[in-house]
Amino acid sequence: MRVTAIIVGLLAAAATAALVLGIFGGGEEGKPGFIGPGVLIADVNLVLQAMLLLGLTFGFYLARKGRIEAHRVNQTIWVLVNTALVVLVMVSSMQDVQLKGLADLGEARIGVTWLHALIGTFTAIAGLWLVLQMNDILPQRLHISGWKNLMRLTLAGYWASAVLGLGVYYTWYAG
């Protein structure tokens, strides 16, 4: 199942990357979105992140029911999809909120975006660490013993990032 988890996860991340790169490559990213006031790339990201959050939460359910192999595959897929979105959409958007000083964080658009980026970065790193550990890719000496608590904390981080992501969407497009 580890090989299946990795292959399916990489395929899902590649499909996500292809979608995002297709939007950027076609010059469509700034066109009006389909949810509300946002642009197309923001709306696509928002929908994929909502699916991701539901998927990761379902993975928590799978683990609680003892379906560990299904949990492994599920979490691997969603964490790799998230990684593709972070790298291709979110990192580049940070250029729009560069800090010139700490006072800039007082502006809602900048402050919410940086808080989202900070929590999201730690969450993404923890998620990747867990996926590498659960699929035995991470060397044994780097495995952590409190992984169940890290899984719970990471899921909470994804939820916090999602709520902050809605705040980012609002301050960028509706506020």
Image: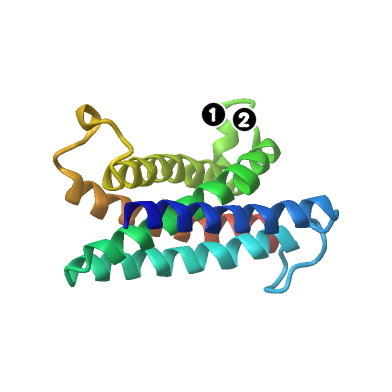
Q: At 61% from the left edge and 60% from the top edge, which residue is drawn? A: 45
Label 2 to label 1, Cα distance in Å?
7 Å
Q: Residues within 10 Å of mark 2 (few under 14, many from 20)?
A: some
Residue at 41 percent of width and 67 percent of height: 55
Element type at mark 1: helix
Q: Where residue 66 sits in the image (x, y, percent)?
A: 17, 68
Specify whether 152 is left or right of 23. left
- 92 vs 140: above or below: below
Q: Which mark is residue 99?
A: 2
Q: Judge from the rendering whether residue 9 lies leftward or rightward of residue 22; answer left or right.
A: left
For residue 1, above or below residue 50: above
Residue at image mark 1: 102
In the image, taking residue 144 as reference, residue 163 lies left or right, namely right
x, y (%) of residue 118?
45, 39
**Three-letter amino acid code of the residue under disc 1:** Leu
Answer few, some or many: residues within 10 Å of disc 1's Cα (few below 14, many 20 plus, some between 14 and 19).
Answer: few
Residue lying at 69% horizontally and 59% vertically, measured from the top left: 19
Q: Position of residue 17 (x, y in %)?
A: 64, 52
The answer to which of 35 and 18 lies nearer the viewer is 18
Tag 2 near tag 1, CB within 8 Å: yes
The local secondary structure at tag 2 comes to loop
